[in-house]
């Protein structure tokens, strides 16, 4: 299925059932993959802030998205929450979240 078809179907599913968290998640991930970050962020925010979904993957995805949007504080908060929900995620983080020394070396 093409991404635009997924967006259309999930949008219709949400219109029919505004509490369909699976549709929000699928649409958010698809929008994220399409690099439509503002729209994806809205769906991730809805999952977390409105429906209070406590899923490490959702926090990790939103954290990565926030990093892409240069919201380092928000990204760090989401990554910390993801780790709290699933400590196994710690080994997956890339160098983006490591601190840099004065000369750019990893600290």
Image: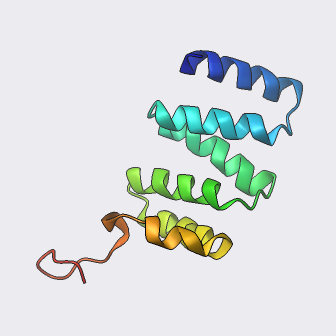
Location of residue 82 in the rendering, given as x and y in whole percent from the top left corner: 60, 67
Location of residue 72 in the rendering, given as x and y in whole percent from the top left corner: 42, 65
Front-most of 92 and 35? 92
Front-most of 4 and 93? 93
Q: Residue furthest left?
A: 103
- Locate residue 47 relative to residue 42 in the image: left or right: right
The answer to whether residue 74 is seen in the rendering is yes
Location of residue 14 in the rendering, given as x and y in whole percent from the top left corner: 80, 29
Compared to residue 1, the image places residue 44 above or below, namely below
Q: Residue at x 59, y 75 (%)?
A: 87
Compared to residue 46, the image places residue 88 above or below, namely below
- Quadrant location of residue 22? top right
Colouring mode (rainbow / by chain / secondary structure / one colour): rainbow
- Locate residue 66 relative to residue 11 in the image: left or right: left
Tell me the quarter of the image containing the N terminus: top right
- Locate residue 93 relative to residue 53 in the image: left or right: left
Q: Residue at x 43, y 59 (%)?
A: 71
Compared to residue 91, the image places residue 22 above or below, namely above
The answer to whether residue 36 is seen in the rendering is no
Front-most of 85 and 76? 85
Compared to residue 12, the image places residue 22 above or below, namely below
Location of residue 106 in the rendering, given as x and y in whole percent from the top left corner: 22, 78
Q: Residue at x 41, y 57 (%)?
A: 67
């Amino acid at each position: 299925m093409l991404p635009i078809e997924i967006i259309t179907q999930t949008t219709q599913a949400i219109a029919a059932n505004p509490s369909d968290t699976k549709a929000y998640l699928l649409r958010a991930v698809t929008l994220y993959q399409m690099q439509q970050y503002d729209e994806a962020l809205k769906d991730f925010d809805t999952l977390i802030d409105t429906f209070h979904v406590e899923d490490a993957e959702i926090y990790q995805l939103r954290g990565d998205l926030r990093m892409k949007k240069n919201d380092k504080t928000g990204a760090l908060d989401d990554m910390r929450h993801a780790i709290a929900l699933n400590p196994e995620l710690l080994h997956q983080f890339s160098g983006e979240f490591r601190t840099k020394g004065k000369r750019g070396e990893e600290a």
